[in-house]
Amino acid sequence: MDYIYDVAIVTAVDIEDESVKSLYDSWRDIKQDDDNQVYYEATFVKDGKQRRVITAKQKEMGMTAASHLASKIINRFRPRYIIMTGIAAGIGAEQIYGDVIVPDVIWNYASGKFVNADNAEITFGDIGFLPRPVAIHMDSDILEIIYSIKKNPDNEFFVHIGPMACGNSVVANRDVVSKQIHSLFPKTVGLDMESYSVFYAAQNSTEPKPKAIVIKSICDYADAEKSDKYQKFAAYTSSRFAKYLFENHLPY
């Protein structure tokens, strides 16, 4: 078995899906008789050859839906690369709205055990948390490409590379960030609800395995000021950086 599609793009919510759909005018829908998920495909030209890209949106937010959709796309369409684009919280230093985050490591900060506060170093009132974080690393060849893009004068995006924390809950409280995330991985630069599952699905799929890339842009800072104001802008920079990456820099 060989790769069928060159790129697959996975999104979690409407605003991310709409931004990806705006990348091309040539999207056409693909419906499967045995699957109620609707997929869309388009083409682009790279190295004189027509390349195929497919996209789909999760039916709900979170890691379970992300893992399910990523696995279906991998098994049905065999993409060479699977890319998750969209929005995330920025929790690193010197970040502004619309900055792009490309994680070199994604870890599940919610993995652990809730206990009595007396039995844990991480506490929230009477509740204690014993973390059992698990992490997945980005492919080293892709990471090298991302670092080279940061230095490329043609690159119009400000890119942060570092760990991404992933969990199933929306976070709008910096105590969670400081106690449960930065206390374990101090250099974590982003926070989202799906990315770990896309990496996991790709790295544990059958052959040929795709290479997974997460590209999320900052729409808030996981604090009490969290709002939807910059989501559209963040979705835009995320999808545009993804297109810049796969049309100009990824090998096929």
Image (tube, helix red, strand yellow):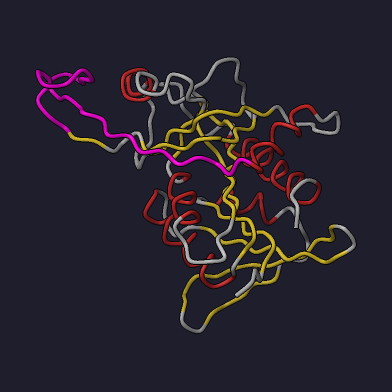
Residue 225 x %, y %: 45, 21
Q: Residue furthest top?
A: 94
Q: Quick one: quadrant of the C terminus? A: bottom right
Vertical comparison of 24 with 165: above or below: below
Q: Quick one: quadrant of the N terminus? A: bottom right
Task: Judge by depth and name the residue closer to the eye, 125 or 71.
Answer: 71
The residue sitting at 61% across, 61% down in the picture is 55
In the image, taking residue 203 as reference, residue 131 lies left or right, namely: left
Vertical comparison of 104 with 79: above or below: above
- The quadrant holding residue 249 is top right
Task: Judge by depth and name the residue closer to the eye, 10 or 49.
Answer: 49
In the image, taking residue 223 as reference, residue 43 lies left or right, namely: right
Q: Which residues are magenta?
A: 114-140
The residue sitting at 50% across, 35% down in the picture is 105
- The quadrant holding residue 126 is top left
Residue 150 x %, y %: 74, 29
